[in-house]
Image (cartoon, rainbow, N blue to C red):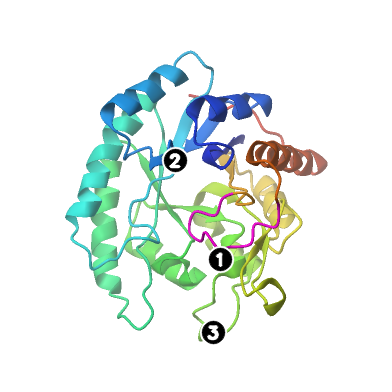
Amino acid sequence: MYLTGIADEASQNIETQIEVTRQLGWNAIESRFIDGKNIHDLGEEAFDQVCKTLDGSGVHINAFGSAIANWGKDVRDDFSITEAEINRTIPRMKRLGARFVRIMSYKVVEGVELMAEERIKRLKLILDAFSAEGVTVVHENCMNYGGMCWQHTLELIDALPGMKLVYDTGNPVFNRDHTKNGKSWQDPWEFYDNVKEHIAYVHVKDCLSPSPENGNKEVYTYPGEGKGRVLDVMTDLMKRGYNGGISIEPHLAAVFHDADSNSGSKEDPIDIYLKYGRLLMDMLDSIGYQYQPYQT
């Protein structure tokens, strides 16, 4: 098992992302934003500079946290938007040697038909395009169709052979369970336990559920301090012999899907990222879960 992280939560400067990764003793970044743009949306000159900066640094990009079919995209949008993102992403992943691309299953719009068949049709086109290039597609349980409940996630898995999952430990805590009329929050352990056979990648995030006391917004915490069952999930992954990537996504200084969300911390983003990574390593050490450098 290796450790990595969405380092734009420390800084959107690639040099700083590399530096905080080194300070943690890691050698991999799950790339999302650099200088205000997703890595697949950077201009060619800017992307070339990112590659030059990474070259010889000892730090690698293990995965792309893409915006493909994410919580900001509508399944009713022209598919050419998704195709263009795919066409920009694949050559960049190949150049950097990244193995995983995070996708979602389009946002859910209240009062609008879910259009499950159309979502699956589009996800198959996404999956086929990346699979043909040897890239593993992992779907995240976020604010999208597959994230509505674990049953929706398994519906996608059944319909899309070859697609894997990135399980985010914190997302169930603030997403409604749509098997229960959307009136209660999802149970993080229940979600994990039902999808774990399909997990190929893990995001570590933790938080408290929205409540009147916190303005009905989720409150993000350090790992193990929220309701995401992070320690339980890590322990189960170890027992099951999981040997893939575990990627930190603190959300304590930056919440990309909700600018108004309560971060629960006013610390410097770099300090937060470093503390978060070290706390996760302490947690893993406490249960004897051994990690090693990312192997390119």
Q: Is residue 155 above or below residue 263?
A: below
Q: Residue at x 48, y 61 (%)?
A: 142
CA distance separating discs 2 and 3: 35 Å
* Front residue (pair 94, 20): 20
Mark 2 or 3 closer to N-term?
Answer: 2
Q: Amino acid at mark 1?
A: Asn
Q: Residue at x 30, y 39 (%)?
A: 89
CA distance separating discs 3 and 1: 16 Å
Q: Is residue 28 above or below residue 282?
A: above
Residue 113 rendering spot, x and y as whole percentages? 30, 80
Q: Is residue 55 left or right of residue 204?
A: left
Whether residue 133 is visible here, answered yes or no, is: no
Q: Amino acid at mark 2?
A: Phe
Q: Which residue is mark 2?
A: 33
Counting other residues with Cα less than 10 Å from the Cα at mark 3, is it few (<14), some (14-19), or many (20 or more)? few
Q: Spot the residue most to the top.
A: 56
Tag 1 secondary structure: helix
Where residue 189 sits, quadrant-wise, is bottom right
Residue stretch in magenta: 254-265
